[in-house]
Amino acid sequence: MAIDKGRTINYLERELYGILASNTGNVWLIEANGEIRHTFTKSDDDGIGGERPPMMATHNGMIVDEKKNEVIGFLNSFGLDQYEAEHVLGLVNRQREIEFSKQFSQRTQQAQYSNDVDRIWRKEKYG
């Protein structure tokens, strides 16, 4: 039984970055117990895909722009057309940018808090 394309797209929107970052071998999507998952070993099931992710497609938490065409080709191996592959890639990059922004904001707030604490400590100690 073939995996529904809509469910494939939803899965790849959630898991693409992790698949690209792990880059441990050829990747198939299979359906087991009603759930889609990826595997790095060929299965007798009706899996889709089977290509190896592009090397070094991720860096600093993002999918590398220079690897866009290779990533789209990788997504095509799961039955996605050009438009669908670009949609998934764009969505994953936007999600990663949002996550990066949140982490940066948290670090900035933590640094500000540390500076405030240090300033108060110095004022109390030295007047």
Image: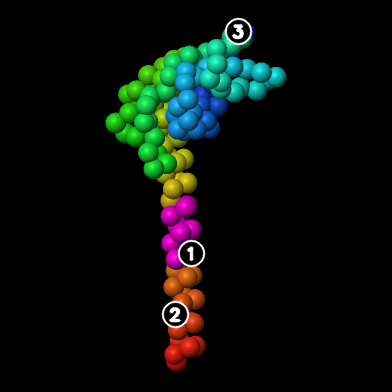
* Residue 105 located within the stretch drawn in magenta: yes
Q: Which amino acid does label 1 sit on?
A: Gln
Q: Which amino acid does label 2 sit on?
A: Arg
Is any atom of residue 59 visible in this view?
yes
Q: Quadrant of the N terminus?
A: top right
Cα distance in 3D space between marks 3 and 2:
64 Å
- Considering the numbered disc 1 on the image, is that residue within a helix, a strand or a loop? helix
Residue 70 location, x and y as percent? 34, 23
Q: Residue furthest left?
A: 66
Of pointers 3 and 1, the one earlier in the residue sequence: 3
| Residue labelled with disc 1 | 110
| Residue labelled with disc 3 | 44
Which region of the structure is painted magenta? 102-111
Cα distance in 3D space between marks 3 and 1:
51 Å
Q: Which of 41 and 45 is in front in this view?
A: 41
Pointers 3 and 2 in contact (C-beta within 8 Å): no
Residue 82 location, x and y as percent? 38, 19
- Considering the numbered disc 3 on the image, is that residue within a helix, a strand or a loop? loop
* Residue 68 located within the stretch drawn in magenta: no
- Considering the numbered disc 2 on the image, is that residue within a helix, a strand or a loop? helix
Pointers 1 and 2 in contact (C-beta within 8 Å): no
Is any atom of residue 80 visible in this view?
no
Q: Residue furthest front?
A: 24
Residue ID at (44%, 73%): 115
Pointers 3 and 1 in contact (C-beta within 8 Å): no
The quadrant in which residue 21 appears is top left
Cα distance in 3D space between marks 1 and 2:
14 Å
Q: What residue type is labelled 3?
A: Asp
Marker disc for residue 119 = 2
